[in-house]
Amino acid sequence: MLYLISLGLFRKEDISLRAFEAIKQCDGVYFENYTNFYKESVKELSAFLGVPLKEVGRKEVEEGTLVREAKESAIGLLIIGDIFSATTHISLYLEAKKAKVKVEIIHGSSVLSAIGETGLSLYRFGAIASIPFQRKNVKSPYEILQKNLKNDLHTLFLLDIEGKVKVKEGISYLLEQGMDTKQLCIGCWQLGGEQEIRSGKAKSLVKIHFDKYPQCFIVPAKKLHFIEEEVVGLWILKSK
């Protein structure tokens, strides 16, 4: 049996009651934190849950170690955010299904829903783009932006956590690719936690620094619904 258990976005208090109950059913519980940032350490989370936790990396998750163990006993994997917000975990789910291992999914909050707090309608987001730490000669994020803008859609940019890519660096990258300095952008720092949200022109937002992670930002569609416009206005940079 394999339990894929979402922890929520940022802190242990976000864990659902259903997740607690699933953890109690497990013979062994693993915690992966290479796909996102989390406030609590493994030791703190273990004490809160009342069970020993073993940290696992990408290798253990992607190379079948957990699925093989789940054939013999009940195994839980704790994942920051929601299970299927990262492609790694849908691959794990598929691998378990092919191995005829029973899987139970416990969903949780994700950046893909938390961005709704910016005021932008989730129905109007186009393809998501990721900006890596090593981005020299990388063109696809800007190409995705252009396609979304052409179709009057918002674009969410996820930033590489391993390189701790910042909002200002992501926007700077788009400016280097040719984005208008007057383009409206919305920066998001540590959504679901001690969050900060700021909106403004790219030339202004590129100067903003918050040492909070994870970070992401949005380039909205050219035309906003009046309700979107009103909520986005709540986050406007006052001095710019």
Image: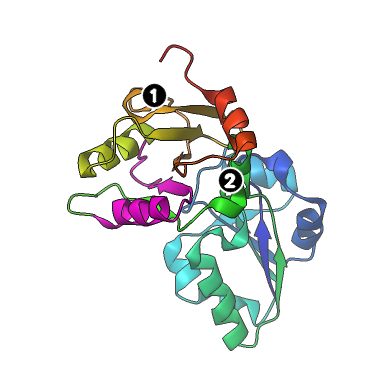
Taking the view exactly as shown, the residue that stands out farthest to the top is: 239
Q: Amino acid at mark 2?
A: Val
Residue linked to disc 2? 42
Specify whether residue 192 is in view.
no
The quadrant of the picture occupied by the C terminus is top left
x and y percent of residue 203 in the render? 31, 26
Badge 2: residue crowd in 10 Å (few <14, some 14–19, many ≥20): some
Q: From this viewpoint, is residue 89 visible?
A: yes
Give above or below for 183 relative to 143: above
**In this picture, residue 96 sits left or right of residue 151:** right
Q: Nearer the viewer, residue 192 or 156?
A: 156
- Span of residues in magenta: 139-166
Check residue 108 for magenta coloring.
Answer: no
Q: Nearer the viewer, mark 1 or mark 2?
A: 1
SS at badge 2: helix
> Which residue is identified by label 1?
209
Where 171 falls versus 139 (above or below)? above
**Residue 85: x percent and y percent?**
55, 58
Q: Quadrant of residue 23?
A: bottom right
Q: Position of residue 35 (x, y in %)?
A: 48, 53
Q: Disc number at residue 101?
A: none
